[in-house]
Amino acid sequence: MNTIEKFNDNVMHTYGRYDVVLEKGSERTCVDENGKEYIDFGSGIGTNSLGFCDEDWSEAVCKQVKSIQHTSNYYYTKVQADFAEKLCKATGYSKVFFGNSGAEANECAIKLARKYSFDKYGKGRHNIVTLVNSFHGRTLSTLAATGQDVFHNYFFPFPEGFVYANANDKADLESKLDGACAVMMEFVQGEGGVNCLDKDFVDFVFDICAKKDILVIADEVQTGVGRTGKFLASEHFGVHPDITTLAKGLAGGVPVGACLADEKCAEVLTKGTHGSTFGGNPIACAGGNVVADKVTAPGFLDEVTAKGEYFREKLLALDEVESVSGIGLMIGIKLKTMNAADVAAKALEKGLLILTAKEKVRLLPPLNITYDEIDRGLDILKSILKG
Ligand SMILES: Cc1ncc(COP(=O)(O)O)c(C=O)c1O
């Protein structure tokens, strides 16, 4: 039985997968079981931030595996302390809670916001306002938080206390704030189609939330850790949310999630109120330390910005491209006539991994991609978009 048959016989069919078995990778290229090579413009949906098996990253992860792979959270580890310190320093937050995924990071943020409000005001002020077209994860609460009807199916009853406001609509948002303890949003909606929030709307949210003591939660699971050319996308907007969640690229491809809180709410989650067996796992933290060191090294983020601009310039020169959205190396491409899913399938055939988001082609290349790799990938994309 071949791998795909074995896989499909034994793994739940929750994804529409391509018929490709990826076997190994190095730098920004991976190889399938038949030896065919693919340039990576997707980084495992924004996760392999340093490409495949970066040397320093692999060495740190392997060293950690051979040193101590796991301890319960009843003990301390240096590697978690180091990672937490790096993250707090890079982001200006007071404290972090580590989980294992974006959904878990958001669960932590939701619990934190509700307890912040409960501790101060008692019951009843528990709503989390999220934005229409957002995506916050696949657990029951984060599905409920996700502002897309298509996700509110089958799994009833969903947790209550989630209210949706239209993105960039100040009046609508304001009208939804009664009974709210937090507003949760992505600065650039990733799964929703690489849509940026307006600066004006963001400023409004921060002002009104500050006045009403409603926390602002930034879901930076996709936008964070250098993806947009800043360590956090919030820096583009000149704001500092009370809580920021991270995952995906945070540890370069080992599972991790982080919920960062500023001093106003960093002590809300107390002993016994939250936890995770694997959260802060030493292997994940070892990977995270390398990512944090590289992304914060002088010049790294400027390179991300420059490469993002390079992509935009080349893409906008193509006739089939109607517009390009996103910031830095988070890129959404609206096409004039072609279907994004068809383009992604053709790209795969020709040796390029790309993504889609709603009706757009989406690119989330590894942050350390080279110009040569960009050119080689874009040549493939160009050959497809020419028809
Ligand atoms: C903005 C955002 N939040 C949360 C999630 C969920 O992350 P995970 O799949 O790691 O649970 C995603 C995943 O795509 C995301 O893009």
Image: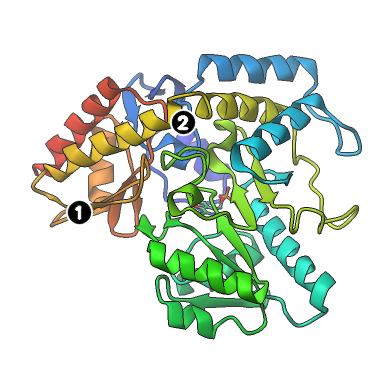
Q: Is residue 63 above or below residue 117?
A: above
Residue type at mark 2: give it. Answer: Asn
Q: Look at label 1 and name its amino acid.
A: Ser
Q: Residue 168 location, x and y as percent?
A: 40, 71
- Position in image of residue 130 (x %, y %): 54, 70
**Relative height, residue 17 to residue 110 (above, below):** above
Residue 2, numbered label: 2
Q: Secondary structure at mark 1?
A: strand
Q: Tag count in the figure? A: 2
Q: Is residue 175 above or below residue 360?
A: below
Pointer 1 local density, CA inside 10 Å: few below 14, some 14–19, many at least 20: some
First reached walking from the N terminus: tag 2 or tag 1: 2
Residue for point 59% across, 81% down: 177
Dots 2, 1 in contact, CB < 8 A = no
Residue 221 percent coordinates (x, y): 54, 49
**Mark 2, secondary structure of its residue:** loop
Circle number at residue 323: 1
Colouring method of the image: rainbow
